[in-house]
Structures are given as structure tokens and as C-alpha cells.
Image: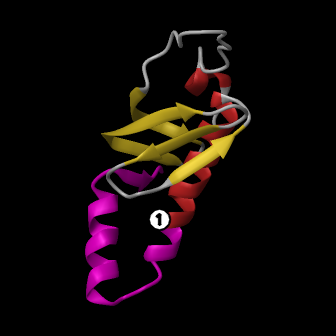
Amino acid sequence: MLTRKHLSGMDTQFVSMPTFAPQVALIGEICPGWRLIKPLVVTFEADDAWWVVSDDEFAVFGNGETRAEAASDYVSALIEYYQLIGRYDDKPSTALFRHLQNFLIVAE
């Protein structure tokens, strides 16, 4: 999962205007054993009680009560997506998996 190192400043609470960028580019180690080798832009959105983190590249999302929880859920979903599509050998899945591997790798 994401650590404080990965999420510095993500637990910010706000009353009126947000003080964070709604879009962030993730790169580097996203959790132990997993590394983004190409920047992946994610968008943070909030409603009354929940945060949602999503990307436009793979249509993966995560949610949580805080920005940190949503980001952690997003990383889990991205890794699950990688593991899921890596199991299929049909042409569309193989193409998606290759595209995902341009961004995300299993760190050695």
C-alpha cells in the first residue's frame, strides 16, 4: 500500500476552496514491489463524504473517506487490473496489458 512518503500532503482537509492540485502525475514506486516507469496522471475529486481518484488512461479508480484512502484504493485497483488482464491471451487483453506495462512494472 501507499506510505506517508508517497502521500505527503494528501490528508489535507479543507473548508471552502481546495488547496491541492486536482490532478497529480504518479511515478516511481507506488507500493512495495510495484513501480510506475512513466508518469500516470490521476484526478482527485471530492463530494460530501468521499474522495475518488481516477485516471483517463486505463479507466481505473479508487475511493475513500480521505485523499490518502482513495489514493491507496486506486493503487490497489491498478495492481489488480494489471494482474487481471495479464492472465488473458486474447488480442485486446494482450494489447491492453502491453500498454499498461509501458507504465507499470513489477519492481525487482
**For residue 85, which quarter of the picture?**
bottom left
Q: Is residue 36 visible?
A: yes
Q: Is residue 45 left or right of residue 90?
A: right
Q: Is residue 100 magenta?
A: yes
Question: Mark 1 falls on what kind of element?
Answer: helix
The residue pinned by badge 1 equals 82
Q: Position of residue 34 (x, y in %)?
A: 51, 48
Q: Which residues are magenta?
A: 82-108
| Residue displayed at 43% across by 25% down | 22
Does residue 32 lie above or below 12 as drawn?
Answer: below
Q: Position of residue 52 (x, y in %)?
A: 57, 41
Q: Is residue 21 left or right of residue 14?
A: left
| Residue located 59% across and 14% down the image | 9
At x 61%, y 52%, the residue is 76
Q: With respect to residue 10, does 54 lie above or below?
A: below
Say what amino acid the circle numbered 1 marks. Answer: Tyr
